[in-house]
């Protein structure tokens, strides 16, 4: 009797050991699938998920996920090709428009020198104003397409956010003064250094300051923190939360923005994210705040 009992206990122990090993192998295979799938999503590779387990169900799961990865790769290539073609089309269109627009502006200037009636002079002013807006939009389109397609060729280097911020604000000093805006800048004494592209960062800061010139009620506060976060704040009573939520959308403009193309903040967002930074806008108590953060 005792022999049968020991045999039964041994059999149960063997079954439990097999189950423990099976569970361990299943958990190991599940971990392999999870890590491999995450890696394939994050990297540009043709390598599929390779599973060491012989379990039929897990191998079917891996095969199914590989099918999805193949489809995702096709969709990604199709999107990249379409995005490239769109950028090239925008570049070509904006380039083709610049020449006739320049000629139109030149002839309008000559026409304004001729004797005209008061009504004709008013019409010419309207035409010239609309032509300048179209010319500005064309220039922004060209710059946007160049920035979107050529960023990979831009060299990044270690720079001090303090210095670039000061340079960017000084460039817009005359425009700020013309709008009676006296910027209040607060930054730490020590240099906040990051590895970024200086030209792209200057463009980001410049576009945000330009945005403040359009919407500010007469103030602008800029704070640079030691963590690398920057905050641009100004009172903007003409805006609301819905408008602020769309400010980073391409070609979105607010009616109060004179001669705005709706590309300034879209370019700032694109360049910020391409340099692994983050940018967001918050509107509270009639104050527009734009937060930018570049991690180390």
Image (tube, helix red, strand yellow):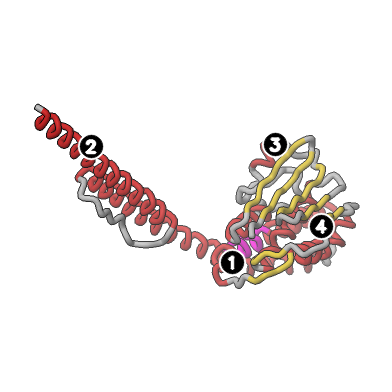
Is residue 96 visible in the rendered image? The answer is no
Q: Is residue 34 magenta?
A: no
Q: CA distance from mark 1 to mark 3?
A: 31 Å
Q: Give the labeled residue for mark 4.
A: 187
Whole-percent x, y for residue 117 in the image: 84, 56
Q: CA distance from mark 2 to mark 1?
A: 65 Å
Q: Earlier in the sequence, mark 4 or mark 2?
A: 2
- Any mark on residue 16, and which? 2
Report helix, strand or loop for mark 2.
helix
Q: Earlier in the sequence, mark 2 or mark 3?
A: 2
Report helix, strand or loop for mark 4.
loop
Position of 163 relative to 63 (above/below): below
The quarter of the picture where the N terminus appears is: top left
Q: Which residues are magenta?
A: 137-146
Which is the main secondary structure of the residues drawn in magenta? helix
Q: As drawn, is 31 to the left or to the right of 95?
A: left
Q: Tell me the crowding category of disc 4: few under 14, some 14 to 19, or many 20 or more residues within 10 angstroms, Cα based.
A: some
Whole-percent x, y for residue 87 in the image: 52, 62
Query: Which of the two discs, 2 and 1, sits closer to the camera?
Result: 2
Q: Tell me the crowding category of disc 3: few under 14, some 14 to 19, or many 20 or more residues within 10 angstroms, Cα based.
A: few
Query: Which of the two discs, 3 and 4, sits closer to the camera?
Result: 4
User: Are discs 1 and 4 less than 8 Å apart at CB?
Assistant: no
Query: Which of the two discs, 4 and 2, sits closer to the camera?
Result: 2
């Amino acid at each position: 009797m005792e022999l049968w009992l020991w045999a039964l206990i041994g059999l149960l122990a063997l079954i439990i050991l097999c189950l423990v090993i099976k569970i361990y192998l299943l958990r190991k295979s599940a971990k392999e699938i999870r890590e491999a799938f995450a890696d394939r999503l994050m990297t540009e590779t043709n390598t599929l998920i390779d599973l060491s387990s012989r379990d039929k169900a897990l191998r079917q799961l891996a095969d199914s996920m590989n099918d999805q990865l193949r489809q995702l790769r096709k969709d990604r290539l199709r999107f990249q090709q379409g995005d490239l073609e769109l950028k090239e089309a925008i570049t070509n269109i904006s380039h083709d428009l610049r020449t006739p627009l320049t000629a139109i502006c030149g002839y309008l200037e000559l026409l304004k020198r001729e004797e005209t009636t008061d009504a004709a002079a008013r019409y010419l002013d309207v035409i010239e104003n609309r032509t300048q807006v179209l010319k500005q939009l064309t220039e922004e389109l060209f710059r946007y397409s160049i920035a979107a397609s050529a960023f990979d060729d831009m060299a990044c280097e270690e720079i001090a956010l303090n210095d670039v911020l000061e340079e960017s604000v000084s460039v817009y000093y005359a425009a700020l003064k013309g709008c009676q805006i006296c910027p209040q800048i607060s930054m730490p004494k020590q240099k906040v250094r990051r590895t970024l592209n200086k030209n792209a960062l200057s463009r980001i800061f410049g576009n945000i300051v330009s945005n403040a010139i359009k919407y500010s009620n007469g103030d602008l506060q800029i704070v640079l923190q030691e963590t690398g976060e920057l905050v641009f704040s100004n009172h903007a009573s003409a805006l609301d939360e819905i408008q602020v939520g769309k400010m980073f959308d391409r070609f979105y403009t607010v009616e109060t923005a004179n001669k705005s193309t709706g590309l300034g903040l879209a370019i700032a967002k694109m360049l910020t994210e391409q340099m692994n930074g983050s940018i967001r806008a918050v509107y509270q108590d009639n104050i527009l705040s734009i937060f930018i953060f570049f991690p180390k």
